[in-house]
Amino acid sequence: AGLTDLRLRFTRAINASAFERGYAEVAVFSLTAAFLLWVHVPKRQFQIDYWQKDLLPIHQAAESFRKHPEWWSDPKTKILIVSDPFKDMHWAPIFIGILTARNMDLQIHRLPDMNPKPDEAILRTFPVALQWQENQFVRVDSAAVPVLR
């Protein structure tokens, strides 16, 4: 309401035709839009960089899963994630694995989240054990996975 009143005051003070006022309004709008873009676009790069920082390990994990469809060739296979790049997002490797495999029945477990910690006999029940090395998942022997206490 305040902007409309301000607009009416300015348009009454200017003795111009409706056609000229229309051009003036378009010019004011265009200048305001250009100013806002000029102010906000440099700050957008910070947001993009922040998103890219979080997106990189997600992309690397998904690409690593895509390269090895044999890891879940059996739809009922159990996968053990020994380590991953996700510190606060414990659900991320499980979610990415299920999405990549397109199989909701896939059983993916993160070793750091397992409670109680599995012993050697339980670790051997996992046909696929994956460890995060050099920005990708690498298959490791589940018998060689250290038992965490």
Image (cartoon, rainbow, N blue to C red):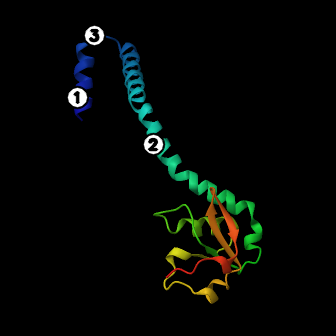
Q: Say what secondary structure mark 2 lies in.
A: helix
Q: Residues within 10 Å of mark 3 (few under 14, many from 20)?
A: few
Residue carrying label 3: 15
Q: Which numbered disc flags the more N-terminal residue, 3 or 1?
A: 1
Q: Dots 1 and 2: beta carbons under 8 Å?
A: no
For the N terminus, give its image quadrant.
top left
**Amino acid type, residue under disc 3 in the picture:** Asn
Q: Which numbered disc flags the more N-terminal residue, 3 or 2?
A: 3
How far across and down, in percent of the image, does residue 73 sit?
77, 73
How far is the residue under mark 3 from the one under mark 1?
Answer: 17 Å
**Amino acid type, residue under disc 1 in the picture:** Asp
Above or below: residue 127 compared with residue 45? below
| Residue at position x 50%, y 76% in the image | 113
The answer to whether residue 106 is visible is no
Q: Which mark is residue 5?
A: 1
Q: Give the side of residue 146 with respect to residue 127, left or right.
A: left
The answer to whether residue 40 is visible is yes
**Amino acid type, residue under disc 2 in the picture:** Gln
